[in-house]
Image (cartoon, rainbow, N blue to C red):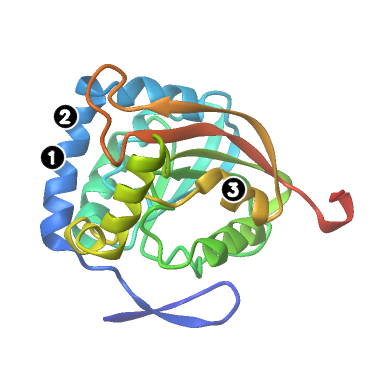
Amino acid sequence: MRLLSTGSGEVVRGPVHHPLFARYYARLSVSAETRLGMARIRERLLAGLSGRVIEIGAGNGLNFAHYPGAVAEVVAIEPEPLLRRLAVQAGLRSQVPVDVVPGAAEALPVKSEAFDAAVLSLVLCSVQDVARTLGEVRRVLRPGGEVRFFEHGRGGGAAMVLTQQALDRTVWPALFGGCHVSREPVAALREAGFRLGPHRRVQLPENGPALPTSFCALGVAWRQDRSDAP
């Protein structure tokens, strides 16, 4: 395991290593671009971004093709080696500059207040510490910087929530690379001090059976200075 230095000088162990899940995810995510309409969601997620962007948990880099030309640079953090190699290849095909680097979401290896925007796309489900991750997002954003998020989490009524919680306590994280299905990303952003902007519920697949991973939120939030908090 390699040691990664962070912007705060702290050292954490990395990288994440889920080779079987990474292969499965790489195949599934590509088919989901058309089958589940993920390409359209990525377009909405990233539309209008500009300046320097950090993408946390970039996976195999499927967002890269959707960044608008006004983006000056994307620094893409991906801890899993196989997915990171695929992301590097996707970055070479991107129309905007992309730098793919290893790192832990809970201790990002970049300077404070260095980015205009942060992208969280199906990543908060699998980080070890959501609050610490969002604290790092706040640290690396400039004052007033925005967060674009597309995350799945708790939803679907009492029976589904009980199912999600049971899965999180048992087999799901072990089978799916640390993923949890009952987290609440919108609430976590609010609790971390971000000011929520427009956001909406999205169900995937839109027309089909509801799965534990079907209940998603797509939206934007902004770094709120402590002095601006109500």
Report which residue position mark 2 lands on: 31
Residue 139 position by quadrant = bottom right
Gap in angstroms between the C-alphas marked 2 and 3: 30 Å
Q: Is residue 3 above or below residue 16?
A: below
Dividing the image into 4 quarters, which one contains the N terminus? bottom left
Gap in angstroms between the C-alphas marked 1 and 3: 31 Å
Q: Residue 155's spot in the image, x, y percent? A: 42, 38
Dot 3: element: helix
Query: CB of mark 2 within 8 Å of CB of mark 1?
Result: yes
Q: In this rendering, would 149 be left or right of 175?
A: right
Q: Nearer the viewer, residue 119 or 111?
A: 119
Mark 3 surroundings: few (<14), some (14-19) or many (≥20) residues within 10 A: few
Dot 2: element: helix
Report which residue position mark 3 lands on: 187
Q: Nearer the viewer, residue 162 or 71?
A: 162
Residue 137 position by quadrant = bottom right
Mark 1 surroundings: few (<14), some (14-19) or many (≥20) residues within 10 A: few
Q: In this rendering, would 185 be left or right of 125?
A: right
Question: Which-is-in-front pick, marks 2 and 3?
Answer: 3
Residue 159 position by quadrant = top left
Name the residue at 62% across, 58% down. 140
Name the residue at 37% across, 20% down. 40
Disc marking residue 177: none
Dot 1: element: helix
Report which residue position mark 1 lands on: 27
Name the residue at 40% across, 41% down. 158
Q: Residue 196's spot in the image, x, y percent? A: 67, 38
Residue type highlighted by circle 3: Ala
Residue type highlighted by circle 1: Arg
Gap in angstroms between the C-alphas marked 2 and 1: 7 Å
Q: Which of pointers 2 and 3 lies earlier in the amino acid sequence?
A: 2
Residue 180 can be seen, yes or no: no
